[in-house]
Amino acid sequence: MKRRETLLGRIREGISDMCYIWAKEMKSVVKDEGVLIFFIIVPLLYPLLYAWVYNNEVVREVPVAVVDLSHSTKSRQFLRHFDSSPDVKVAWHCNNLEEARRLIGHQQAYGIIYIPTDFATRLSRMEQSTISVYCNMSFLLYYKAIYQTATAVVGAMNSKIQISLSGHYTDQEDLLTAAPLAYDEVPLFNSAAGYGSFIIPAVLILVIQQTLLLGIGLAAGTAREQNRYRDLVPVSRHYNGIFRIVLGKSACYAMVYAILAAFEVLVVPRLFHFVHIGDNITILWVMVPFVLSCIFFGMFISCIIRYRENVILLIVFTSVPFLFLTGVSWPLSSIPGVWQGVSWLIPSTFGVRAYVRINSMGATLADVRPEYIALWVQTLVYFFLTCAVYRYQIIMARRHAVQRLEEIQKSIQDS
């Protein structure tokens, strides 16, 4: 009976300590303007801004410069069909390539269509003619619009030339001449081939992670600068007190991001009409270990950072590499093995892969089981690593407090 009462007393004591740490951390978060910016304002506004910028999905009316040295019916026919496409626009007619290159240099055009002098003459002689396409490769979306439009127009003109030279009399014979092998192009999971539906899901997950790391790092830097760790020493009466500290602080962050994470992964895609075919419950199941792993990862990283300004430099610097390591913007098979190993240490790697497959491909929880398990493993590993680092910091804080007290007593005795 006495042992049971002792156990219940320790449980009540542990819950009381966790609530104390939670309340103390919540007050520090509310009072710190920098933490509030990264915990509230940035997660709410940044995804909206990013999604709004890419809401058009594809580029339209890309300006193109034309150098038509043929001045023939065929060349004008090609340019007429090329200009009728919604993706490009014939904005400039130039006399030579040098003039067209200057337009690209001044970003007044993003591509050049060059039609040689003998274009129509070679076609009339039943010889192969050429049309040269020069694209600005600094922006791949412009290259895609110009090149694909030119390829489609050339293909259509080739089919008409083949039909006119075939000498057939029926539509079926003309169809077989122009396209003897039919094919259907079916874009999977991104029917509009839009850049927004491709990149926004990964960015949403990365925003959750990076803002958590920034907010936790700023809070820890402020506590270290103000030496607030001495306030935690009375609470950590036993080694179990470390668990109470870590769980109390993480509960504060989890309460804030429970709403923010749901907003980003469920509301933002629907608000801007991006691809969203996944089950909401499945997405939330994945978000639980992802947010927890980000919290403990951020608490562990924050122990290494001494000043609060340093966390901004570190997290902002790693945002783009973290996006590449997810395997979304760059094929996973092309990433070196060493960097793939590094990516396994980062929660966003498995969080992005799982969310993209569920949200954009309609995967189930069983389909993303490896990523789901990896997130829980990261949660446990970073939780115990955080506890170990916090225990070391509190021990050092106690030693510093004892040394300081001894110095004060010694100075009093000497005086």
Image (spheres, rainbow, N blue to C red):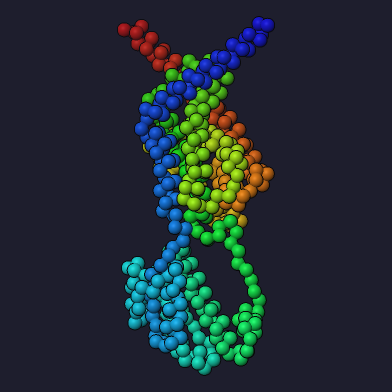
Give residue 315's position: percent from left, percent from top.
44, 42
Looking at the image, which residue is at 55% across and 34% down?
292
Looking at the rendering, in which quadrant would you find the C terminus?
top left
| Quadrant hosting residue 172 | bottom right
51 versus 90 height, above or below: above
328 versus 390 height, above or below: below
Give residue 245's position: percent from left, percent from top.
51, 23
Q: From this viewpoint, which residue is outermost toward the front?
A: 170
Residue 225 visible somewhere in the drawing:
no
| Foreground residue among 187 and 20 | 187
Looking at the rendering, in which quadrant would you find the N terminus?
top right
Give residue 160's position: percent from left, percent from top.
55, 83
Looking at the image, which residue is at 45% across and 75% down?
82
| Foreground residue among 281 and 255 | 281
Looking at the image, which residue is at 41% across and 12% down?
406
| Quadrant hosting residue 230 | top left
253 versus 323 height, above or below: above
Looking at the image, which residue is at 55% across and 27% down?
388
Residue 61 visible somewhere in the drawing:
yes
Give residue 307's position: percent from left, percent from top.
39, 33
